[in-house]
Image (cartoon, grey):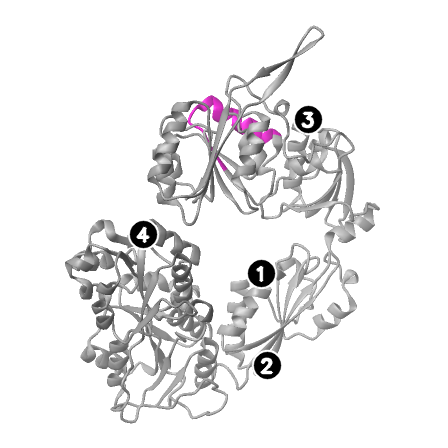
Amino acid sequence: MSSRSDITGDKTPLIKEKMDKGVLIFGGTSEGRDIAWRLSGLGIPCMVCVATEYGRYAMGNDNGGNSPEIHVGRMNEDEMKQFVTGGKYSLVVDATHPHAGEVSQNIRKALKGTDIGLIRFRRNVAGSFDEAEKYDRIRYFDSFKNCVEALGEVRGNILFTTGVKELPGIAREEVLKRAYVRILPSAESLEMARGAGVPQSHIIAVQGPFSQRMNETMMEEYNIKLLVTKASGDAGGYREKLLAARNRGVEIFVVRPPVVETADDGNIKSVELNNIGECIRYIGREYDKITENAFVEISLIGMGMGDERLMSREAEEALRSQDVYFGSPRLLELLPEEAVKFSVYEPDEVLLKLRRVIAENSYGSMKAAILFSGDTGFFSGAKRMSAAIKAFSDNSGIGAGLKLYPGVSSVSYFSSRTGISYDNAVIISHHGRRANVLSEVMMNRKVFLLVSDAAELKLLARKISLSGLEDITIHAGYDLSSEDERIICVRAGEYEAMPENGICCAFIINDGELLPITPSLGDGFFKRGDVPMTKEEIRQLSICKLKLPKDAVLYDVGSGTGTISVESARLSNDIKVYAIEREKEAAELTASNVSKAGHENVIVVNETAPDAFVELEAPTHVFIGGSGGRLEDIVRAIMTKKQGRVRFVINAVTLETMSVITELLSRLKHEDEEIISIQINRSETKGRLHLMKAENMIHIVSFEL
């Protein structure tokens, strides 16, 4: 067998008939899926063989109608021989799992004596885990059988992440009683696990990928002392498992991939590759879909405000020298009629179309422009496109260069047209994203706002007016730089007169009293009614103990008036808060205070905890101000739902509640526990005298699970 990693060297063809027969891919791996999608994108017919229905599901539908065919079902040696030699295929790609040695052996036997070429895609299973492998508690085994024989040398619970096919090998009582198996959540996997004798409570049926943090959480939850895994490379999450085990002090048994015997292969024409891009480039050349050293130079061009006069000279010159153009219809209209242009702008759609253009025209090299409105560095889709192009270059088999050309942004253009500077403005995009516009307007003198359209700006102006800020000044620009350009200046209270059509942006000027930037809005800001409220000093200390990062997902359980939800949400637009309240009156009051504060990152849930958690995303932080007597149920439900570490803060008034909390903590494995008690004394005037009146003592408990 010849083996090479640089396919630009030896050009010996693997196949004789190129265009009329397809490629047969033995997959079941992420690499097999990616190879199939990319070949289909080049117009090369593909059949992918997977063992299970779950494998069919994992293939997805990347190319719409141009997706590869899929065959489901395991095949023995004779069935594989018949399938491979049925006359439909000129080339076979073995992209099976590194540990599927028997399947790889059968593929080679099936090809023996045929003219069908073979590419063995071999995932790199070692060499990228140096940081993890400095750990001195790793042992390696050449077979799963040898690994199982050594299990008795380690006490404690074992986490198996080796797949269901290996489970019959652990069917011994002394192993099963301490074995936890992580498998795919398919009916077949569950049946095989039960058939191997694994107790139902020891089966962890969940779909990856698993981050290091998720692995650590599972190891902690099940008190794992030994991890058994296969050396399966980055695509198999191998490194994340090793790092998690190292951090938890868990011993690791690693099973190496089997060696596939090739001595009796006869004259099989084969190469071995370990890079998806090389594999696609190789096959693309074999099928005349990619010319030698195919390369595309991609330009991301900022078109400014849609007026050619506002483009930079460099961008204008780049625009004239392209072979093909992609972008929105509005931007493509600026190009000559004869230009080759495609009205797509989402990264996946653009790059799929680009692959097809290259395949259909057999380009050796070409230039492609992707057009963006405004500036490529200002709330632009160029950021996502750049990342997608890098992946395209790595995995498509087509080399790609990238250059960005800046354009005139909406904020700089509108600033010049209105004379309003933007160096001291808070810049917000509400275009296809969440943003707390009202709260930013309340706290800042000047806000520059990008919106999806004029109708959205009108709704935001109405919201600002109804919040009591009807005198706020709005400078709005519509269809800027076009013949229909229009700029107006209105008070928020005049929102009814604002247009509803057109592309727009705005400067919002607040010359009135600003909300404080201090952590607390003050109790007087909130509507209260007859619902209990967490007082200003207590909620600020409680939020401090939550230690919320910018991307936190917070459950405010028993939200009451919503003060914790509002104060937490205003810390960052990226924080997401679920205000969970069982009482209808309190939930409505929470919603009213959230609306008053102008927060779009708070979702009010009028249900009882923990039942309310079912449809919500997993939290990173939980505040419990009221549990309705179900504190343990709530904590246990979070433990089941969480995907990583969760920080809790609980407020308690009575000693009975404190007793419940401390007793629960005594039974839970937790970290960073802290209990403080605080009593606020507030002055009251009696004539000329000031008397200090004591409020109830509050106990604040914080910990992590």
Cα–Cα gap, marks 1 and 2: 24 Å
Mark 3 is on which residue type? Answer: Gly
Farthest residue, direction top: 687
Picture layout, residue 452 above or below residue 578: below
Residue 310 picture location, percent across and down: 78, 60
- Image side of residue 515 versus residue 52, left or right: right
The label shown at residue 692 is none
Mark 1 is on which residue type? Answer: Arg
Residue where numbered disc 4 is placed? 223
Q: Nearer the viewer, mark 4 or mark 3?
A: 4
Cα–Cα gap, marks 4 and 2: 56 Å
Cα–Cα gap, marks 1 and 4: 40 Å
For the question of whether residue 302 can be seen, the reply is yes
Cα–Cα gap, marks 1 and 3: 38 Å
Q: In the picture, which quadrant includes the N terminus?
A: bottom left
Number of marks = 4
Residue 107 picture location, percent across and down: 27, 81
- Image side of residue 78 versus residue 686, left or right: left
Residue plotted at (51% across, 22% down): 697
- Sequence-wise, the earlier of marks 1 and 3 is 1
Q: Is there CB contact under 8 Å for labels 4 and 2?
A: no
Q: Nearer the viewer, mark 1 or mark 2?
A: 1
Looking at the rendered structure, the secondary structure element under dot 1 is: helix
- Sequence-wise, the earlier of marks 4 and 2 is 4
Q: Nearer the viewer, mark 1 or mark 4?
A: 4
The label shown at residue 365 is 2
Cα–Cα gap, marks 2 and 3: 60 Å
